[in-house]
Amino acid sequence: MYDLVVIGTGMGGGTLLAGLCDSGLRILAIERGDFLPREEQNWQVDAVFGARRYRTRETWLDGQGRWFVPNLHPWVGGNTKVYGAALVRLRREDFAPVEHAEGISPGWPITYEELEPYYCLAERLYLVHGSSGEDPTEPLRSCPYPYPPVPHEPVVAELAAQLRQAGLHPSALPLGIDLRPNGRCLRCSTCDGFPCRVHAKADAEVRAVRPALQFPTVELRPRTVARRLLTDATGRRIRAVEVESGGEVFEILAEQFVVAAGAVHSAALLLRSANDTHSHGLANRSGAVGRFLMAHHNTLLMAIDRRRENATTFQKTLAVFDFYWRTPAFPYPAGSLQLIGKRSPETVALSFPALTMDEARDIAAHSVDWWLLSEDLPHPENRVTVRSDGHIQVTWHPTNGTAHTALLRAAREVLEACGYREFLVQSIGLDGVAHYCGTVRFGNDPATSALDPSCRAWEIENLWVVNASVFPSSGAVNPALTIAALALRAADHLRRQFGIATPVRETVQRLTGAQLQP
Ligand SMILES: Cc1cc2nc3c(=O)[nH]c(=O)nc-3n(C[C@H](O)[C@H](O)[C@H](O)COP(=O)(O)OP(=O)(O)OC[C@H]3O[C@@H](n4cnc5c(N)ncnc54)[C@H](O)[C@@H]3O)c2cc1C
């Protein structure tokens, strides 16, 4: 019998493990994947993007009943094993209702101020390099960035200067990489989207799970899938999780259970766990479980200037938030822009198959490559369901498309003013979605949310959900830092639940060797 079972070791589950590692609680983490091997293929474009070596083999159905392979990476560390480590805070206003062109983005049951100390801890744990004072939409901070920003290479520095001249406020993109003195980061071209072979990317395996496993009361069961959660006779408590491992099916008992299986699998697990008392799935009296799936609007925008060579290796250092709340032509929130890892000829050819290899080479040599991100509004019919044959179906029609169109237009105009005359645009579809969230949202009202403001199920006293699925709205920034901050906050709630007096701040201090403000 464990004190706590955590299902999933990605940004949510992994960070929670770190936050509880020295609590003395007997904790078991269950992870469907294994440790991702450190091997040559980690940094090979054809292996990572061509053969999709590290992607799941699982298939889901879309709303029209067509199969697709989701952009998921079932390893210890979850999707953070391949993430771009852009670790950005939501804006303060994102926690309150915000009017968008196509509807209202709902508020959160907590304020920015309540999460802010946990953002500081998450930035410390994940080695965030950044700088404040450049971005006008930046929320207030009670701590400085733990590490200075990753320096721009010359072409990016020149672009930042041009954007400033054009009246914008480009800022350093906050990044979780190990560029500390003696840090392992090489600032190579195979970071964004690749696993880090030298473990210099601050992913959940390297920064949270492995350190947690140094403590004797924390255990991990990799290659183990949680199939169902089983309630006791009252229906008010989880008794056990039924798992499958090595061809065997068995139950694991614990006092408290945390679901951290990512936005889609967390909802699917709760739905699959339906029983006589909870006929629509666990934590689902409101009907919210599986619904309000959000995914962000993402577009790859390659801005090309054939007169200017871009020999940048580590390009992902710049962000622009000027259009977050409006553009010159659009009076509603539009979203954010950030540079992504430098596109190579091979990745250009994969994104745009109509190009010849020579064309792809020429474009890669002369482009700067942007990732555009706009908010997707929660809609009850955008949802995860589990079919009677057990397959997952994801029905998602992006909302708020006018905001993304406005963002794209504003980005092109300003880049044209900086001399970029040609553009290649790739919008990201369902099989490329990297930012799933919603589906088990927390809130103040049990009639409309699955979880209370501490991320505990309203109707099951020992069930918690700690990952991207709790988001009531998605904002227009990358989600991982917010997931980590929520997980550290949940760690404090769980400590209190078990009567542990020391706060998670002391654990992060211990893990990072930092002196942190009380
Ligand atoms: C290519 C790519 C780039 C990205 N770049 C960024 C970025 O730069 N910045 C950013 O903020 N975000 C980025 N993201 C998104 C970020 O990685 C995710 O938002 C984040 O990892 C989600 O955290 P999570 O805990 O909800 O889920 P995950 O991190 O996906 O973790 C879920 C874990 O649960 C496990 N699991 C699932 N089902 C079960 C089960 N039934 N039993 C046992 N285990 C289970 C999975 O194997 C996985 O390990 C990126 C994602 C991708 C794919």
Image (cartoon, rainbow, N blue to C red):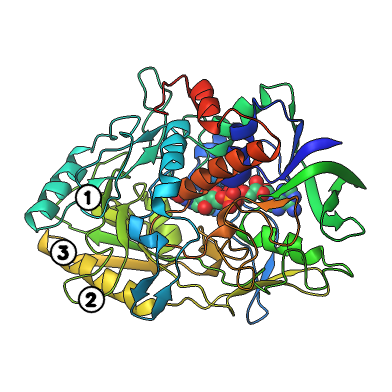
Q: Position of residue 172 (x, y in %)?
A: 26, 43
Query: What is the secondary structure assignment of the residue under circle 2?
Result: loop
Beta carbon at label 3 within 8 Å of ligand 1: no
Q: Earlier in the sequence, mark 2 or mark 1?
A: 1
- 2 and 1 marks in contact (CB < 8 Å): no
> Looking at the image, is 387 positioned above or below residue 117?
below
Mark number displayed over residue 331: 2
Residue 304, image x, y percentages: 22, 59
> In this orientation, which residue lies closer to the viewer: 505 or 91?
505
Please count the marks in the image. Answer: 3
Give the CA separation, mark 3 to mark 2.
17 Å
Taking the spot 46% from the left edge, 73% from the top edge, the residue there is 377
Residue 401, position in %: x, y? 38, 77
Q: Which quadrant is home to the C terminus?
A: top left
Q: Earlier in the sequence, mark 1 or mark 3?
A: 1
Q: Position of residue 315 (x, y in %)?
A: 30, 44
Q: Tell me the mark number nearer the camera, choosing from 3 and 2.
A: 2
| Residue situated in front as seen by the camera: 88 or 181 | 88
Residue 400 visible in the snapshot: yes
- Callout 1, which amino acid? Asp
Label placed on residue 414: 3
Residue under circle 1? 135
Residue 79 shown left or right of residue 24 in the figure: left
**Residue type at mark 2?**
Pro
Q: Secondary structure at mark 3?
A: helix
Q: Residue at x 56, y 75 (%)?
A: 396
Above or below: residue 491 compared with residue 225 = above
Can residue 39 be seen at all in this image of the molecule?
A: no
